[in-house]
Amino acid sequence: MSPAARVAGLGTTIFTEMSALAVRTGAINLGQGFPDTDGPASVIEAAVAALRSGENQYAPLPGVPALREAVSEHQRDWYGLEPEDVLITFGATEGIAAALLGLCDPGDEVVVLEPYYDSYAACISFAGAVRRPVTLRPPGFEVTVDALEGAVTSRARVLLLNSPHNPTGRVLGRAELEMIAAACVEHDLICVTDEVYEHLVYDGEHIPIATLPGMAARTLTISSVGKSFSFTGWKIGWCSGPADLVAATRMVKQYLTFAGGTPLQHAAAAALRLPRSDIVALADDLRAKRDQLCSGLRAAGLQPLVPGGTYFVNADVGVDAVDFCRGLPERCGVVAIPTGVFYDDKEAASSLVRFAFCKRPEVIAEAAERLASLRT
Ligand code: PMP
Ligand code: GLN
Protein backbone atom coordinates (compact mmCIF):
# COMPACT_ATOMS: atom_id res chain seq x y z
CA MET A 1 0.00 0.00 0.00
CA SER A 2 1.37 3.42 -0.80
CA PRO A 3 1.36 6.23 1.76
CA ALA A 4 -0.53 9.49 1.36
CA ALA A 5 1.12 12.00 -0.94
CA ARG A 6 1.77 14.31 1.99
CA VAL A 7 4.24 11.86 3.52
CA ALA A 8 5.68 10.36 0.35
CA GLY A 9 8.67 12.67 0.12
CA LEU A 10 9.53 12.85 3.80
CA GLY A 11 11.97 9.98 4.42
CA THR A 12 13.55 9.26 7.80
CA THR A 13 14.85 12.21 9.85
CA ILE A 14 18.59 12.71 9.77
CA PHE A 15 18.57 12.43 13.60
CA THR A 16 17.06 8.95 13.48
CA GLU A 17 19.45 7.87 10.72
CA MET A 18 22.54 9.16 12.49
CA SER A 19 21.57 7.92 15.97
CA ALA A 20 20.95 4.46 14.50
CA LEU A 21 24.38 4.66 12.85
CA ALA A 22 25.92 5.53 16.22
CA VAL A 23 24.24 2.55 17.90
CA ARG A 24 25.22 0.20 15.05
CA THR A 25 28.87 1.24 15.03
CA GLY A 26 29.33 1.99 18.74
CA ALA A 27 30.47 5.51 17.78
CA ILE A 28 30.22 8.55 20.08
CA ASN A 29 26.98 10.30 19.12
CA LEU A 30 27.60 14.02 18.58
CA GLY A 31 24.73 13.98 16.06
CA GLN A 32 21.27 14.12 17.60
CA GLY A 33 21.16 16.88 20.20
CA PHE A 34 20.42 15.37 23.59
CA PRO A 35 22.43 15.63 26.80
CA ASP A 36 23.99 12.51 28.33
CA THR A 37 23.19 13.66 31.87
CA ASP A 38 19.88 14.47 33.57
CA GLY A 39 18.63 17.95 34.35
CA PRO A 40 18.36 19.28 37.92
CA ALA A 41 17.58 16.70 40.62
CA SER A 42 14.95 18.93 42.25
CA VAL A 43 12.97 18.90 39.01
CA ILE A 44 13.10 15.09 38.88
CA GLU A 45 11.88 15.04 42.49
CA ALA A 46 8.98 17.27 41.48
CA ALA A 47 8.04 14.71 38.80
CA VAL A 48 8.24 11.86 41.32
CA ALA A 49 6.12 13.82 43.80
CA ALA A 50 3.49 14.48 41.12
CA LEU A 51 3.45 10.79 40.10
CA ARG A 52 2.98 9.77 43.73
CA SER A 53 0.30 12.33 44.52
CA GLY A 54 -2.31 11.27 42.01
CA GLU A 55 -1.44 13.63 39.16
CA ASN A 56 -1.83 10.83 36.65
CA GLN A 57 -4.99 11.57 34.66
CA TYR A 58 -5.68 13.85 31.71
CA ALA A 59 -4.51 17.40 32.15
CA PRO A 60 -6.99 20.10 31.10
CA LEU A 61 -6.71 20.88 27.36
CA PRO A 62 -4.76 24.14 27.91
CA GLY A 63 -2.42 22.41 30.38
CA VAL A 64 -1.96 22.08 34.13
CA PRO A 65 -2.73 25.47 35.75
CA ALA A 66 0.52 25.43 37.79
CA LEU A 67 2.59 25.16 34.62
CA ARG A 68 0.56 27.73 32.69
CA GLU A 69 1.08 30.15 35.58
CA ALA A 70 4.80 29.32 35.71
CA VAL A 71 5.12 30.05 31.97
CA SER A 72 3.38 33.43 32.41
CA GLU A 73 5.61 34.29 35.35
CA HIS A 74 8.71 33.21 33.44
CA GLN A 75 7.82 35.41 30.45
CA ARG A 76 7.18 38.35 32.77
CA ASP A 77 10.20 37.90 35.05
CA TRP A 78 12.77 37.18 32.35
CA TYR A 79 11.49 39.39 29.53
CA GLY A 80 8.80 41.75 30.82
CA LEU A 81 6.17 40.06 28.62
CA GLU A 82 2.53 39.66 29.68
CA PRO A 83 1.12 36.88 27.47
CA GLU A 84 -2.70 36.90 27.19
CA ASP A 85 -2.84 33.13 27.08
CA VAL A 86 -0.67 30.02 27.50
CA LEU A 87 -1.06 26.53 26.01
CA ILE A 88 0.94 23.47 27.11
CA THR A 89 1.94 21.06 24.32
CA PHE A 90 3.82 17.78 23.76
CA GLY A 91 7.17 19.46 23.37
CA ALA A 92 7.81 22.47 21.22
CA THR A 93 7.36 20.09 18.28
CA GLU A 94 3.62 19.80 18.84
CA GLY A 95 3.33 23.54 19.43
CA ILE A 96 5.00 24.28 16.10
CA ALA A 97 2.84 21.74 14.27
CA ALA A 98 -0.41 22.94 15.85
CA ALA A 99 0.47 26.60 15.28
CA LEU A 100 1.23 26.09 11.59
CA LEU A 101 -1.90 23.98 11.06
CA GLY A 102 -4.00 26.46 13.02
CA LEU A 103 -2.68 29.59 11.33
CA CYS A 104 -1.94 28.68 7.70
CA ASP A 105 -4.34 27.97 4.85
CA PRO A 106 -3.27 26.04 1.76
CA GLY A 107 -1.16 28.26 -0.46
CA ASP A 108 -0.12 30.61 2.34
CA GLU A 109 3.61 31.21 2.51
CA VAL A 110 5.76 30.70 5.58
CA VAL A 111 9.00 32.65 5.69
CA VAL A 112 11.61 30.61 7.54
CA LEU A 113 15.30 30.95 8.27
CA GLU A 114 17.33 28.26 6.55
CA PRO A 115 18.99 26.04 7.63
CA TYR A 116 15.74 25.10 9.40
CA TYR A 117 14.87 22.52 12.02
CA ASP A 118 13.50 19.61 10.02
CA SER A 119 10.00 19.47 11.52
CA TYR A 120 9.32 22.97 10.17
CA ALA A 121 9.43 21.83 6.55
CA ALA A 122 7.22 18.82 7.24
CA CYS A 123 4.60 20.81 9.17
CA ILE A 124 4.52 23.64 6.63
CA SER A 125 3.77 21.05 3.99
CA PHE A 126 1.14 19.29 6.17
CA ALA A 127 -0.63 22.66 6.33
CA GLY A 128 -0.55 22.88 2.52
CA ALA A 129 1.58 26.00 2.92
CA VAL A 130 4.75 26.90 1.05
CA ARG A 131 8.09 27.63 2.66
CA ARG A 132 10.11 30.67 1.64
CA PRO A 133 13.60 30.37 3.06
CA VAL A 134 15.80 33.24 4.22
CA THR A 135 19.25 31.76 3.70
CA LEU A 136 21.84 32.14 6.47
CA ARG A 137 25.32 31.58 5.05
CA PRO A 138 28.48 30.52 6.84
CA PRO A 139 30.65 31.69 8.41
CA GLY A 140 28.50 34.40 10.07
CA PHE A 141 24.95 33.11 9.40
CA GLU A 142 23.56 36.68 9.55
CA VAL A 143 20.07 37.58 8.34
CA THR A 144 20.55 40.02 5.46
CA VAL A 145 18.01 42.54 4.29
CA ASP A 146 18.25 41.19 0.73
CA ALA A 147 17.57 37.61 1.80
CA LEU A 148 14.65 38.73 3.94
CA GLU A 149 13.10 40.98 1.31
CA GLY A 150 13.55 38.28 -1.31
CA ALA A 151 11.60 35.78 0.79
CA VAL A 152 8.58 37.88 1.76
CA THR A 153 5.91 38.05 -0.95
CA SER A 154 2.28 39.19 -0.83
CA ARG A 155 1.29 35.56 -0.06
CA ALA A 156 3.33 35.46 3.15
CA ARG A 157 1.23 34.76 6.25
CA VAL A 158 3.65 33.52 8.92
CA LEU A 159 7.29 34.23 9.68
CA LEU A 160 8.67 31.22 11.55
CA LEU A 161 11.68 32.37 13.55
CA ASN A 162 14.18 30.41 15.61
CA SER A 163 16.74 32.09 17.87
CA PRO A 164 18.99 30.84 19.39
CA HIS A 165 19.12 28.99 16.11
CA ASN A 166 19.50 25.30 15.41
CA PRO A 167 21.65 24.11 13.62
CA THR A 168 23.93 27.18 13.32
CA GLY A 169 24.12 28.16 17.00
CA ARG A 170 23.49 31.79 16.03
CA VAL A 171 21.86 34.08 18.60
CA LEU A 172 20.21 36.77 16.49
CA GLY A 173 21.21 40.33 17.43
CA ARG A 174 18.89 43.24 18.09
CA ALA A 175 19.44 44.86 14.67
CA GLU A 176 18.53 41.64 12.84
CA LEU A 177 15.47 41.11 15.02
CA GLU A 178 14.37 44.70 14.41
CA MET A 179 14.68 44.12 10.68
CA ILE A 180 12.56 40.96 10.95
CA ALA A 181 10.02 42.74 13.17
CA ALA A 182 9.78 45.58 10.65
CA ALA A 183 9.05 43.07 7.87
CA CYS A 184 6.36 41.42 10.02
CA VAL A 185 4.68 44.76 10.71
CA GLU A 186 4.98 46.01 7.12
CA HIS A 187 3.55 42.81 5.61
CA ASP A 188 1.13 42.10 8.48
CA LEU A 189 2.69 38.72 9.25
CA ILE A 190 2.15 36.48 12.24
CA CYS A 191 5.46 35.62 13.88
CA VAL A 192 5.79 32.11 15.30
CA THR A 193 9.05 32.05 17.23
CA ASP A 194 10.77 28.89 18.43
CA GLU A 195 12.86 29.80 21.46
CA VAL A 196 13.65 26.33 22.83
CA TYR A 197 17.31 27.32 23.36
CA GLU A 198 16.41 30.59 25.13
CA HIS A 199 18.54 29.82 28.21
CA LEU A 200 21.47 28.29 26.34
CA VAL A 201 23.24 31.53 25.42
CA TYR A 202 26.98 31.99 25.90
CA ASP A 203 27.73 35.27 24.14
CA GLY A 204 25.31 38.15 23.80
CA GLU A 205 21.73 37.89 25.02
CA HIS A 206 18.53 36.22 23.94
CA ILE A 207 16.02 38.85 22.83
CA PRO A 208 12.50 37.45 22.40
CA ILE A 209 11.07 39.07 19.27
CA ALA A 210 7.77 39.55 21.14
CA THR A 211 9.52 42.26 23.19
CA LEU A 212 10.12 44.47 20.13
CA PRO A 213 7.67 47.31 19.35
CA GLY A 214 4.54 46.14 17.54
CA MET A 215 5.38 42.46 17.95
CA ALA A 216 3.60 41.24 21.11
CA ALA A 217 0.20 41.34 19.41
CA ARG A 218 1.37 39.29 16.41
CA THR A 219 3.81 36.82 18.01
CA LEU A 220 3.28 33.28 19.26
CA THR A 221 6.30 32.29 21.38
CA ILE A 222 7.15 28.59 21.72
CA SER A 223 9.57 26.93 24.12
CA SER A 224 10.00 23.71 26.07
CA VAL A 225 11.66 21.98 28.98
CA GLY A 226 13.83 19.77 26.76
CA LYS A 227 16.87 21.84 25.85
CA SER A 228 17.12 24.53 28.50
CA PHE A 229 16.62 22.07 31.38
CA SER A 230 18.10 18.86 29.88
CA PHE A 231 14.90 16.81 29.79
CA THR A 232 14.55 16.14 26.07
CA GLY A 233 12.66 12.89 26.71
CA TRP A 234 9.85 14.60 28.59
CA LYS A 235 8.37 16.48 25.66
CA ILE A 236 6.67 19.21 27.62
CA GLY A 237 6.43 22.48 25.71
CA TRP A 238 4.42 25.69 25.77
CA CYS A 239 3.07 28.42 23.52
CA SER A 240 2.33 31.89 24.84
CA GLY A 241 1.10 35.13 23.34
CA PRO A 242 -2.07 36.85 22.14
CA ALA A 243 -5.35 35.07 22.82
CA ASP A 244 -6.26 34.65 19.13
CA LEU A 245 -2.98 32.98 18.15
CA VAL A 246 -3.02 30.67 21.18
CA ALA A 247 -6.69 29.79 20.49
CA ALA A 248 -5.94 28.81 16.87
CA THR A 249 -3.10 26.60 18.08
CA ARG A 250 -5.22 25.06 20.86
CA MET A 251 -7.98 24.25 18.36
CA VAL A 252 -5.59 21.97 16.48
CA LYS A 253 -3.88 20.60 19.56
CA GLN A 254 -7.19 19.41 21.00
CA TYR A 255 -7.55 16.96 18.13
CA LEU A 256 -3.89 15.98 17.81
CA THR A 257 -3.26 14.81 21.38
CA PHE A 258 -5.76 16.71 23.57
CA ALA A 259 -3.53 16.62 26.66
CA GLY A 260 -0.84 14.55 28.29
CA GLY A 261 2.26 14.22 30.44
CA THR A 262 0.39 15.47 33.52
CA PRO A 263 3.07 14.67 36.16
CA LEU A 264 5.81 16.03 33.93
CA GLN A 265 3.85 19.25 33.46
CA HIS A 266 4.03 19.72 37.23
CA ALA A 267 7.77 19.10 37.12
CA ALA A 268 8.22 21.55 34.24
CA ALA A 269 6.59 24.20 36.46
CA ALA A 270 9.28 23.47 39.06
CA ALA A 271 11.96 23.83 36.36
CA LEU A 272 10.68 27.25 35.28
CA ARG A 273 10.61 28.34 38.92
CA LEU A 274 14.21 27.33 39.61
CA PRO A 275 16.28 30.18 41.00
CA ARG A 276 17.73 32.28 38.20
CA SER A 277 21.25 31.32 39.32
CA ASP A 278 20.51 27.62 38.72
CA ILE A 279 19.29 28.35 35.20
CA VAL A 280 22.37 30.46 34.48
CA ALA A 281 24.56 27.65 35.88
CA LEU A 282 23.16 25.23 33.27
CA ALA A 283 24.34 27.59 30.53
CA ASP A 284 27.74 28.09 32.21
CA ASP A 285 28.26 24.34 32.20
CA LEU A 286 27.41 24.16 28.49
CA ARG A 287 29.66 27.14 27.69
CA ALA A 288 32.62 25.18 29.08
CA LYS A 289 31.61 22.20 26.93
CA ARG A 290 31.34 24.42 23.87
CA ASP A 291 34.87 25.69 24.49
CA GLN A 292 36.16 22.17 25.08
CA LEU A 293 34.72 20.80 21.83
CA CYS A 294 35.83 23.87 19.85
CA SER A 295 39.42 23.33 21.08
CA GLY A 296 39.14 19.66 20.17
CA LEU A 297 37.93 20.52 16.66
CA ARG A 298 40.81 22.97 16.20
CA ALA A 299 43.28 20.32 17.34
CA ALA A 300 41.76 18.00 14.76
CA GLY A 301 42.38 20.60 12.06
CA LEU A 302 38.72 21.62 11.77
CA GLN A 303 37.90 25.31 12.21
CA PRO A 304 34.81 25.64 14.43
CA LEU A 305 32.29 28.40 13.74
CA VAL A 306 31.97 29.20 17.44
CA PRO A 307 28.26 29.42 18.34
CA GLY A 308 26.80 32.09 20.65
CA GLY A 309 24.08 29.70 21.85
CA THR A 310 22.40 26.26 21.56
CA TYR A 311 24.53 23.15 21.98
CA PHE A 312 25.72 22.81 18.41
CA VAL A 313 28.94 23.85 16.73
CA ASN A 314 29.55 23.74 12.97
CA ALA A 315 32.83 23.18 11.19
CA ASP A 316 33.74 23.20 7.51
CA VAL A 317 35.22 19.82 6.62
CA GLY A 318 36.27 20.87 3.12
CA VAL A 319 34.56 17.91 1.40
CA ASP A 320 30.96 16.81 0.88
CA ALA A 321 29.52 16.75 4.41
CA VAL A 322 27.01 13.95 3.77
CA ASP A 323 29.78 11.58 2.59
CA PHE A 324 32.01 12.77 5.43
CA CYS A 325 29.34 12.04 8.07
CA ARG A 326 28.43 8.65 6.60
CA GLY A 327 32.12 7.61 6.75
CA LEU A 328 33.00 9.23 10.08
CA PRO A 329 31.98 6.37 12.43
CA GLU A 330 34.18 3.95 10.53
CA ARG A 331 37.07 6.39 10.19
CA CYS A 332 37.20 7.51 13.80
CA GLY A 333 34.16 6.40 15.82
CA VAL A 334 32.22 9.69 15.92
CA VAL A 335 28.77 10.58 14.57
CA ALA A 336 27.87 14.11 13.42
CA ILE A 337 25.20 15.70 11.22
CA PRO A 338 25.67 17.23 7.75
CA THR A 339 24.26 20.75 8.13
CA GLY A 340 23.30 20.97 4.44
CA VAL A 341 20.31 18.67 4.96
CA PHE A 342 18.57 21.60 6.68
CA TYR A 343 18.89 23.84 3.60
CA ASP A 344 16.82 24.04 0.40
CA ASP A 345 19.85 25.74 -1.14
CA LYS A 346 22.09 22.69 -1.35
CA GLU A 347 25.16 24.76 -2.27
CA ALA A 348 24.95 27.06 0.76
CA ALA A 349 26.70 24.79 3.26
CA SER A 350 27.55 21.53 1.51
CA SER A 351 30.80 21.00 3.43
CA LEU A 352 29.49 22.01 6.86
CA VAL A 353 29.12 19.50 9.71
CA ARG A 354 27.24 20.00 12.99
CA PHE A 355 28.59 18.54 16.22
CA ALA A 356 26.61 18.50 19.51
CA PHE A 357 28.53 19.39 22.67
CA CYS A 358 25.87 18.56 25.31
CA LYS A 359 27.95 15.60 26.51
CA ARG A 360 30.04 14.84 29.61
CA PRO A 361 33.57 16.34 29.48
CA GLU A 362 35.17 12.88 29.31
CA VAL A 363 32.97 12.02 26.31
CA ILE A 364 33.92 15.27 24.55
CA ALA A 365 37.60 14.58 25.32
CA GLU A 366 37.35 11.10 23.86
CA ALA A 367 35.52 12.38 20.77
CA ALA A 368 38.17 15.08 20.29
CA GLU A 369 40.94 12.50 20.52
CA ARG A 370 39.20 10.34 17.94
CA LEU A 371 38.68 13.30 15.62
CA ALA A 372 42.37 14.21 15.97
CA SER A 373 43.18 10.88 14.34
CA LEU A 374 41.71 12.32 11.12
CA ARG A 375 44.87 14.43 10.81
CA THR A 376 47.20 11.47 10.54
N1 PMP B 1 12.88 23.43 17.80
C1 PMP B 1 14.21 23.30 17.66
C2 PMP B 1 14.96 24.39 16.99
C3 PMP B 1 14.85 22.16 18.14
O1 PMP B 1 16.16 22.03 18.00
C4 PMP B 1 14.09 21.16 18.78
C5 PMP B 1 14.73 19.93 19.30
N2 PMP B 1 14.63 19.96 20.67
C6 PMP B 1 12.71 21.34 18.88
C7 PMP B 1 12.13 22.49 18.38
C8 PMP B 1 11.83 20.32 19.50
O2 PMP B 1 11.62 20.58 20.83
P1 PMP B 1 10.85 19.53 21.77
O3 PMP B 1 11.83 18.44 22.07
O4 PMP B 1 10.45 20.31 22.95
O5 PMP B 1 9.69 19.02 21.00
N1 GLN C 1 16.55 18.91 18.25
C1 GLN C 1 17.44 17.78 18.12
C2 GLN C 1 18.61 18.15 17.23
O1 GLN C 1 18.56 19.11 16.53
C3 GLN C 1 16.82 16.55 17.52
C4 GLN C 1 15.45 16.21 17.90
C5 GLN C 1 14.96 15.05 17.05
O2 GLN C 1 15.55 14.00 17.06
N2 GLN C 1 13.93 15.26 16.30
O3 GLN C 1 19.56 17.43 17.22
Image (cartoon, rainbow, N blue to C red):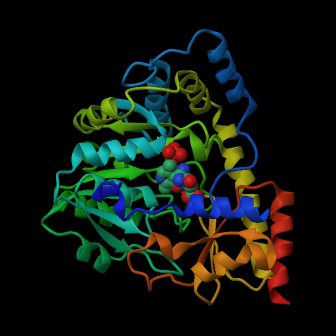
Question: Where residue 214 sits in the image (x, y, percent)?
Answer: 24, 50
Question: Where residue 15 sits in the image (x, y, percent)?
Answer: 58, 60
Question: Where residue 301 sits in the image (x, y, percent)?
Answer: 76, 86
Q: Is residue 267 visible?
A: yes
Q: Residue at x 42, y 26 (%)?
A: 259
Residue sticking out furthest to the left: 154
Residue sticking out furthest to the top: 54
Left or right, residue 353 beside residue 100: right
Q: Residue at x 34, y 53 (%)?
A: 123
- Screen quadrant of the N terminus: bottom left
Question: Where residue 314 sits in the image (x, y, percent)?
Answer: 61, 73
- Screen quadrant of the C terminus: bottom right
Q: Residue 44's image quarter?
A: top right
As drawn, 177 above or below 98: below
Left or right, residue 144 beside residue 75: left
As drawn, 256 above or below 155: above
Q: Residue 156's image quarter?
A: bottom left
Residue sticking out furthest to the front: 1
Quarter for ligand 2?
Answer: bottom right
Nearer to the camera, 230 or 182: 230
- Marker count (numbered): 0
Nearer to the camera, 81 or 171: 171
Q: Is residue 84 visible?
A: no
Q: Residue at x 25, y 42 (%)?
A: 102
Left or right, residue 153 beside residue 279: left
As drawn, 124 above or below 169: above
